[in-house]
Image: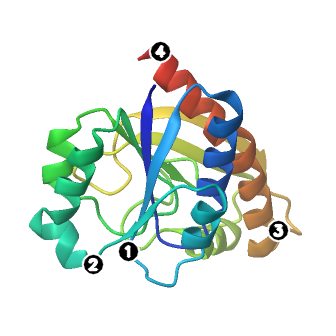
Amino acid sequence: MIKIVIFASGSGTNAENIIRYFQATKSASVEAVFTNKADAQVIQRAEKYQVPSLFFTKNDLETGKVLQEINAIQPDLIVLAGFLLKFPESIVAEYPNKIINIHPALLPKYGGKGMYGMHVHRAVVENKESKTGITIHYVNENYDEGNIIFQKEVTVLISDTPEVVAAKIHELEQDHFPAVIEKLIIKG
């Protein structure tokens, strides 16, 4: 069985969607959810599906404790689903082309440190973009610069608020993220 671990920092809607998808399809198994926020809602979402969650600190991430936990699981794929910390080069080096991230914009636009969630959607609206979307990409040593795996765009109307854009992006994430993951693991 293909093993996946998920890293998330927040509410965990993408993590839950991925867990639910693979519990239904049985093409892979989500072995654990890692989070750097002790009160993150993703913990309850994982528990609902009997997926263990592991809380860690930024220090644990930087000193190799998290890498030890990952290595104990030996995942085939590491999925960043709303994970806000920079992923350490030591983990990237240990799992080359085995770590993916979803970004709420069409990279290379609106990527980089601090560009996540509503920060991205506000920037899209303020810059009067006619389209935005999602990007699923490999993780490398720099924020949002890994090779692109998949992009899907959506129209931004002049009347759209950042909240409306966020809802459109969330729908794209829910519709596409698990299926793209499945294609990746089947392709091997």
Residue to which mark 1 is pinned = 36
Dot placed on the residue nearer the N-terminal end, 3 or 4: 3
Give the spatial CA distance, label 3 vs label 4: 34 Å
* Percent coordinates x, y for residue 82 in the rendering: 51, 62
Q: Is residue 70 visible in this depiction of the protein?
A: yes
Give the residue at x 51% y 68%. Answer: 116
Q: Residues within 10 Å of mark 2 (few under 14, many from 20)?
A: some
- Kind of residue at badge 3: Val
Give the spatial CA distance, label 2 vs label 1: 6 Å
Asked if the residues shown at circle 2 and circle 3 are in contact, with their CB atoms under 8 angstroms apart, the answer is: no
Residue to which mark 2 is pinned = 57
Q: Residues within 10 Å of mark 4 (few under 14, many from 20)?
A: few
Give the residue at x 23% y 38%. Answer: 95
Camera-nearest label, 3 or 4: 4
Position of 93 with respect to 171 (left or right) is left
| Front residue of 27 and 170 | 27
User: Any mark on residue 164, and which?
Assistant: 3
Helix, strand or loop at disc 3? helix
Give the spatial CA distance, label 4 vs label 2: 34 Å
Q: Residues within 10 Å of mark 1 (few under 14, many from 20)?
A: many
Dot placed on the residue nearer the N-terminal end, 2 or 1: 1
Asked if the residues shown at circle 4 and circle 1 are in contact, with their CB atoms under 8 angstroms apart, the answer is: no
Dot placed on the residue nearer the N-terminal end, 4 or 2: 2
Residue to which mark 4 is pinned = 187
Position of 51 with respect to 166 (left or right) is left
